[in-house]
Image (cartoon, rainbow, N blue to C red):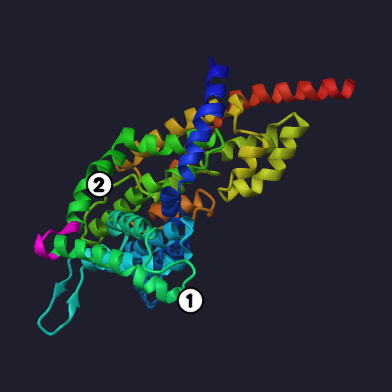
């Protein structure tokens, strides 16, 4: 049975998923998120620095930096998605125009209020992670329209006009149609498109915040990873949901309420991604300290430092875990059990739900567990999760270690 699954995943499933992730429309979303990661990380650093306010009364409030990094994600994505679409569609001369158009339509659809003195009033929260859903739709729409019109030009290929002038004229019609669509929705129909998009994506957000939805959002990337498919393949679907949920938690916490969205990236970095996707740190520790096989012992020594900092690519492809049933099966089990324990611990209030930006994924646990939640009980939960994952991995590790030791003994006898 396992052989049939492996053959299907190798020959059919994995190639198809890789083909989807390399699709220019999907990969443009992935690249956009990857591009803004440094800004998200700055917001995370500010979260850590802000802890000093609880200890040192005179320390200045630097939270405004977070507002203009993490708090402007929607704007950045609205620019970057059409930019990358044009780049991947070999329309490099139009990518900046595409990005600017995406930004224009995004601001238009935020439903700003025009005041009598000529000032424009926006709702700040709509610029941040909450606006990711709108920026995704805007970015894809702008990219689609501009690419559709890229096949048309007012000028022949041998025209002597400078390229930038040809781009000006060739983008006049698509940009006009794009902005006209925004005007029809926001002005003529008087529709708050931002709220419409949130309502459309709300069911998906609600699903991820349930127990089954949260566990699946952890399990699926880990499952794909065991077949060599990067967890980043899930970014277009899950990441906007996570970021929007965190923004909602921040608003609730700022108003004095109790955050309820467990499905946020901070929860992953605090608990479920111990050693990387799949909670693989316990497996590395076993290899480092308990392996009898020289090969596994060497892999443990080589991967222990990266794994402590939650980097497990060397382990996944070096042990290997990928396409290795001895480690794939326990990783699947761990990726169900660990998020299950995490969910109920946070849901029952035993540990605080994250409400601040913390995406420093390379910070070792349980340090990251405390920083992400600002709750000392998170340290205890992280230790428990490590022990549970260790127990699940151990019998599979032991069986594989015995097999590898036997192979080494046979080779040495030969």
Nearest the camera: 411 or 135?
Answer: 135
Q: Position of residue 274 (x, y in %)?
A: 52, 43
Label 1 and label 2: CA atoms lie apart by 48 Å
Instruction: Identify the residue shown where x is 38% and y is 77%.
Output: 60
Q: How many marks?
A: 2
Identity of the residue drawn at 32% across and 62% down: 74
Whether residue 190 appears in magenta in the rendering, the answer is: yes
- The percent coordinates of residue 388 (x first, y second) are 50, 32
Tell me if residue 267 can be seen: yes
Indicate left or right for 314 with 97 as reference. right
Say left or right for 218 vs 191: right
Q: Which mark is residue 160?
A: 1
Residue 229 marker: none
Work out which residue is located at the far bottom of the displayed protein and give it. Answer: 117
Residue 201, label in figure: 2
Q: Which dot, 1 or 2, sits closer to the camera? A: 1
Is 214 magenta? The answer is no
Residue drawn where x is 48% and y is 37% of the image: 17
Q: If you read the primary sequence from the N terminus, does the residue marked by circle 1 or circle 2 appear first?
A: 1
Q: Residue furthest right?
A: 414
User: Few, some or many C-alpha atoms within 10 Å of disc 2 (few <14, some 14-19, many ≥20)?
Assistant: some
Q: Where is the C terminus found, in terms of image quarters?
A: top right
Label 1: how many residues lie within 10 Å, few (<14), some (14-19) or many (20+)?
few
**Residue lying at 42% horizontally and 66% vertically, measured from the top left:** 94
Q: How far across and down, in percent of the image, does residue 75 sit?
A: 33, 65
Residue 353 is at least partly visible in this image: no
Instruction: Kindly state the secondary structure of the residue where label 2 is placed.
Output: helix
Q: Which residues are magenta?
A: 187-193
Expressed as whole percent of the image width and height from the top left, the position of residue 76 reads 37, 65
Label 1: which secondary element: loop
Q: Quadrant of residue 347?
A: top left
């Amino acid at each position: 049975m396992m052989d049939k699954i492996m053959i299907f995943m190798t020959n059919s499933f994995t190639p198809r998923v890789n083909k989807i992730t390399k699709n220019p429309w999907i990969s443009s979303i992935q690249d956009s998120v990857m591009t803004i990661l440094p800004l998200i990380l700055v917001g995370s650093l500010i979260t850590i620095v802000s802890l000093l306010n609880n200890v040192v009364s005179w320390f200045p409030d630097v939270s405004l930096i977070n507002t203009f990094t993490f708090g402007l994600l929607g704007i950045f994505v609205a620019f970057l998605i059409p930019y990358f679409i044009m780049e991947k569609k070999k329309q490099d001369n139009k990518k900046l125009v595409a990005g600017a158009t995406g930004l224009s339509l995004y601001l238009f659809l935020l439903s700003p209020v025009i005041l009598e003195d000529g000032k424009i009033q926006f709702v700040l929260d709509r610029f941040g992670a909450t606006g990711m859903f709108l920026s995704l739709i805007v970015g894809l729409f702008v990219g689609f329209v501009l690419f559709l019109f890229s096949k048309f030009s007012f000028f022949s290929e041998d025209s002597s006009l400078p390229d930038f002038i040809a781009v000006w004229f060739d983008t006049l019609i698509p940009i006009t149609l794009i902005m006209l669509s925004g005007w029809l929705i926001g002005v003529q129909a008087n529709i708050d498109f931002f709220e419409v998009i949130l309502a459309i994506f709300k069911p998906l957000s609600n699903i991820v915040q349930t127990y089954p939805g949260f566990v699946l959002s952890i399990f699926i990337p880990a499952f794909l990873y065991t077949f060599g498919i990067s967890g980043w393949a899930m970014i277009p679907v899950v990441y906007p949901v996570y970021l929007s949920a965190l923004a909602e938690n921040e608003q609730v916490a700022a108003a004095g309420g109790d955050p309820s969205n467990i499905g946020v990236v901070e929860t992953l970095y605090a608990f479920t991604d111990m050693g990387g996707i799949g909670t693989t740190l316990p497996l590395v520790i076993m290899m480092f300290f308990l392996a009898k096989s020289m090969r596994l012992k060497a892999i443990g020594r080589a991967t222990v430092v990266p794994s402590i900092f939650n980097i497990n690519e060397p382990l996944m492809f070096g042990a290997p875990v990928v396409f290795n049933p001895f480690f794939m099966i326990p990783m699947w089990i761990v990726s169900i059990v660990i998020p299950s324990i995490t969910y109920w611990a946070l849901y029952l209030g035993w540990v605080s739900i994250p409400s601040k930006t913390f995406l420093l994924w390379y910070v070792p646990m349980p340090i990251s567990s405390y920083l992400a939640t600002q709750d000392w009980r998170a340290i205890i939960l992280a230790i428990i999760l490590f022990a549970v994952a260790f127990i699940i991995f151990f019998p599979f590790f032991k069986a594989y270690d015995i097999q590898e030791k036997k192979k080494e003994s046979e080779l040495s006898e030969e």
